[in-house]
Image: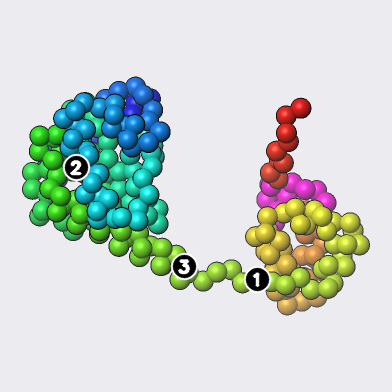
Amino acid sequence: MGIGAPLESVGRPGRASSGKVVFLAVKQATSIDEYLSWIPKEQRAALERLRAAIREAAPEAIETISYQMPAFKDHGTLVAFAAFKNHLSFFVMSTAVLDAHEDELGEYRTAKGTIHFQPDKPLPDALVKKLVKARVEENEKKKSEKEARPRRPRYPMPDYIKRELEGKGLMDAYRQRPPFQQNDYVGWITRAKQEATRQRRLEQMLDELQRGDVYMKMAYKPKQEKRDAP
């Protein structure tokens, strides 16, 4: 595996082609500093400049290695970069952001949220900062939208379900199920409008807990507890 990234397409400005590029090296870095230490001096200088601009635009972002590439995370992956044999890549991770700044990209080649450039023609710092800040805003918006989504209602367990679980010796089996399954079972049973329906659903839950490998008539594979080696 290379220190760059998965094979990517390279095309003429603004468009991607089906051409392939090859990895620059065969090592796997564990940090951005290590990654940069392995690449040629000219490429390293261009990527160090890119790195500095990213950090200035997103000081809260965390540096990491993701998919063998130097990456920055802030409410999810923000941007990344990589060195390849014939070019450098700045992964903006957003076609929407690139499209919004299309006029500023000039002759730089782009492909699926990525900008390709040469070491002797690095990306302007101002453009990098603008793109990174746009990605920060995009990630923050996604985070806010996710938090605003209505969450599943929590259903307290009524006494009659508790009595049945304890009476059948299935309370431990119930508690070993994931929290969402526990909540779904209780909600599903208690939402029944007819007593006969409620009883039928209760019996199904008890049967599935007894069997251990079924959830709502679907196959379920419990997670195996990790055991210490002898």
Residue 113 at x, y percent in the picture: 25, 47
Residue drawn at the location 27% of the way across and 40% of the way down: 81
In the rendered structure, does residue 217 fall within the stretch colored magenta? yes
Q: Label 2's element?
A: helix
Instruction: Residue 146: tell me if it is visible.
Output: yes
The amino acid beneath tag 2 is: Arg
Q: Quadrant of residue 47?
A: top left
| Residue on which the image places disc 2 | 49
Q: Residue at x 55, y 69 (%)?
A: 151
Disc assigned to residue 154: 1
Q: Left of 128 or right of it: where is 172?
A: right
On the image, the x and y values in percent for residue 34 come to: 34, 31
Location of residue 133 in the rendering, given as x and y in whole percent from the top left corner = 25, 58
Nearer the N terminus, badge 3 or badge 2? Answer: 2
Does residue 160 belong to the magenta stretch? no
Question: Taking 44 as reference, is 206 above or below it?
Answer: below
Q: Nearer the viewer, residue 43 or 210?
A: 43
Q: In the rendered structure, which amino acid carries the disc numbered 1?
A: Arg
Label 3 to label 2: alpha-carbon separation: 35 Å
Front-lying residue, 72 or 174 = 72
For marks 2 and 1, the one nearer the N-term is: 2
User: Quick check: can you spot residue 111?
Assistant: no
Residue 23, image x and y in percent?
29, 26
- Range of the magenta residues? 210-221
Residue 106 as seen in the image, left or right of residue 216: left
Mark 3, secondary structure of its residue: helix
Of the image marks 1 and 3, the number of the one nearer the N terminus = 3
Asked whether 17 or 45 is in front, the reply is: 45
